[in-house]
Amino acid sequence: MNKSAIDNLKEALKYSPDNVPLRFLLAETLLANYILDEAENEFSTLLKTTNNDNAKFGLAKVHFEKANYSICSVILEDLISHGTNEVKILVLYAKTLLKENTIGKAIDVYQKILNMDPDFSDKELDEKLRIKDFDEMLEIEDDENELSDRFLQKSDINFNDVGGMETVKKEIELKIIKPLQFPELYKSYGKKTGGGILLYGPPGCGKTFIAKATAGEVKAKFISVSLNDILDMWIGNSEKNLHEIFELARANAPCVLFFDEIDALGASRSDMKQSGARHLINQFLQELDGINDTNDGILIIGATNTPWNLDGAFRRPGRFDRIIFVPPPDAATRQSILKLKLENKPAGAIDVETIAKKTDNYSGADIDAIIDIAIEKKLEDSFKDGYPKPLETNDLTAALKKHKPSTQEWFATAKNFAMFANDSGLYDDILTYLKIKK
Amino acid sequence: MDDDQLSKAKILIRQEKWAEAEKCLAILLSENSDSAYLHILLAEAKIGQNQLKQANTIIENAIQLSPDEPLAYYVKSRIFVLQNNLKEAEKFILESIRLDPEDADYFAFLANIQNARNKFKEAMESANQALELNAENVLALTIRGSALASLGKTKESIESIEAALRENPNDAYTHASYGWSLLENREHKKALEHFREALKNDPNSDYARSGMKEALKASNMIYRFFLGYGLKVSKMTKKQIGGLFIGIFITFQVLKNIIRTNQDTARLVAGCFSIFLILFLLSTWLATPLSNMLLRLNQYGSFLLTKEEKRSSNFVAGSLCVFIVSCLLCFFSNKFASIAIFGFVMMFPSSVIFTASKYRYLLWVCAFVLAVFGIFSIVEIFSTGGITMILAFVLSFILFLALTNFSRLRESNR
Ligand SMILES: Nc1ncnc2c1ncn2[C@@H]1O[C@H](COP(=O)(O)OP(=O)(O)OP(=O)(O)O)[C@@H](O)[C@H]1O
Ligand SMILES: [Mg+2]
């Protein structure tokens, strides 16, 4: 069929927009002609009024062609779970799984197909799934498991575990959680939902912590890539590593893919010009842009203490175009952090407010440290006295003297960058925080 | 040795993640405690965190472990530079060069030190040697440019700087060094641009920040004059400064003799001239804190000043106010002249005690004694009208000036 046939169908639909078979025909025709966006529209329209399995399958085919494998597999799983066991559906499912690199599952499905139709043959599936000898298969499975074991976590905290930080939470809510929950709404307002967000700020103020809580908040899986993992990429087969991690994320969408100390992907500013120092960044950007694969349903969060060491290419639109400053906790936040941390500790009535007031410039990690110091002291005392006593306010005050705030040094440097290297207003948040007018 | 771990440590150092690098190196060192190379890397990480004393101990270890490792001496030399001990720094970089005469970086670093010690010709020669080994060495090109500028060869200097900027248009050190040469040439506007560029690329560079400060203040004509004078003096060798002192001394002797003669016009001219000369010499002390006061009116400028500089300008301003107010009060009673003198004199210690680095405590003690003398002399004048204390006060002031001059010379590191 050609273009005029499509036009004819569209014309006919104008007069009878509720004609289901006609719209179905149009959708199939569009798909056959690789006009994928329109085909997707038509199938979606159909699904609004009917609960037609064929329309669902059509939509799955569209997503397969668009390489949205994760969505495709979700639709197919839905169909299969409703008892539809047609061979064509299973075949598409097997192919999708293959694309998603979940070989083990693909083989299961392939076996099911062969059981239903012993004469079945498909070049791609046969090649990839039948010829594999058993050992090799196991090895692939192992690799995959090792990767998931290492990186895939279930986040056991959510925003309730994060004390205060209301502004940061609100921004994350608006900038990542909502787009993940309502992608269609964002699209309809012409808002892009891809890309990532970058958290920056002094050490120990909860960047890693809130990223993890974000995953818990959206009940998504959490893939965490640490500084050490990035270093491994530098010295090992980095291209494979990075690609595999992104693939793992795609296979587990929706999920939060978190890169801690993301600046480590690049060299220092002075090293940037050296060609070798850039390949990891370039590879990362390729994956981020989703040139070869789509990143639908993946929230990418990066965190860094030294945003100024981050390559400018990271901040282009569609990449880390949302940058959030995570400041040291304010008094109210410190108070709730203290309450949270003291919850399961043997503590008496502690005047959290006073301690919060005395811990200006202390980070969340500093507060951890203070409580640690206080508890150690208590332990020592309990050996002396022979019985344990609960933590009191003045134990914490005493500990304050032993641990000085660690954020000041960071601000000394950050201030200079905000004053002298702040061309695009990137560090305005720092200036605002320090109450420096430009 | 665990090669992966070592590579990681090196990457972390390149990325300036010093604390993490240190952890990584600690693991390596626990198994290879006799590796000089690991010690050198660890010293590097310590330098990055500005823990110079510890870095120094570690590099000493490295040198003991491997006395013919040129890199160790180079790192040691860098520590001395950071500690502002250029003489020792030069000794150690020469040792690196002796052990490895093929490394352009060592020669460039030597040139840098010589240039900072006002040995411009030698600096230029070392830079040339570096460039023979590697014509694209940015530091060597930069130092060559700076040395040439100080030798008055402006055109060649600019060529060298431009070559450096061609190699790396974002090199903060090159921009800053160029800025300083431009300041010397009284091109403060162009200097400002280069300092700005330097700070954009390395906002933490003290060298660029202090240059920026001077360039901003130089928009004031009077300050520009003092800056030009100050920069000239700072580029003089010890001999030249000695010459300058003797010159000033002889000038005063001549002026004194003229004043003693009977010719009225000559006396008048010589009198005015000597007052002018005295005022000028004294004002070289106050130019910096007073101009800093002006700089504080501008948010950006005020940000550039250190806490000490701000404090110093506060005290000088306070003393100046005391001086002016009591001068006015002299119309009522000339006893107030004593307070005026007190205010005037106290401007001088205020201008140095906060910012001097060597002999700082000695200067504090002297300033304190001076202040006590001053207060006693005021009390004496107002109660008995006697002037013995004020004489002692002025005398100790002159002593104080001499002492500070001496400490400044010692500090100048040549
Ligand atoms: N708002 C908060 N509520 C509860 N705990 C917090 C909060 N902020 C920080 N913390 C505590 O501080 C610790 C350190 O925080 P985290 O590791 O997230 O800091 P970071 O910003 O990632 O630091 P770094 O830059 O050093 O990686 C966390 O383990 C957490 O216990
Ligand atoms: Mg972290």
Image (tube, rainbow, N blue to C red):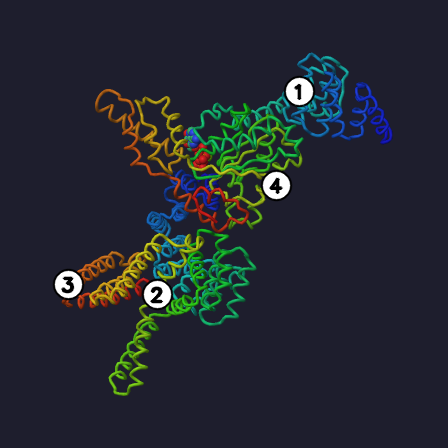
Relative to residue A199, is residue B346 drawn left or right?
A: left
Chain of residue at mark 3: B
Label 2 amino acid? Arg
Which disc is residue A107 wearing? 1
Question: Helix, strand or loop at disc 4?
Answer: loop
3D distance between C-alphas at marks 3 and 2 = 45 Å
Instruction: Same chain for labels 4 and 2? Say yes or no.
Output: no
Relative to residue A388, is residue A194 drawn left or right?
A: right
Label 1 amino acid? Ile
Tag nearer the camera, 2 or 1: 2
Q: Earlier in the sequence, mark 3 or mark 2?
A: 3
Is residue B251 positioned above or below B226 on the image?
below
Question: Helix, strand or loop at disc 3?
Answer: helix
Label 4 amino acid? Pro
Chain of residue at mark 1: A
Instruction: Find disc 3 in the rendering and name its residue.
Output: B380
Chain of residue at mark 4: A
Is residue A194 positioned above or below B72 on the image?
above
Which disc is residue B414 wearing? 2
In the image, residue A426 lies at what x, y percent? 52, 44
3D distance between C-alphas at marks 1 and 3 = 105 Å
Is residue B174 positioned above or below A268 on the image?
below
Q: Are marks 4 and 2 in contact (CB under 8 Å)?
A: no
> Can the viewer see residue B351?
yes
Instruction: Find disc 4 in the rendering and name its residue.
Output: A317
Dot 1 alpha-carbon crowd within 10 angstroms: few under 14, some 14 to 19, many 20 or more: many
Relative to residue A311, is residue B368 drawn left or right?
A: left
Label 3 amino acid? Glu
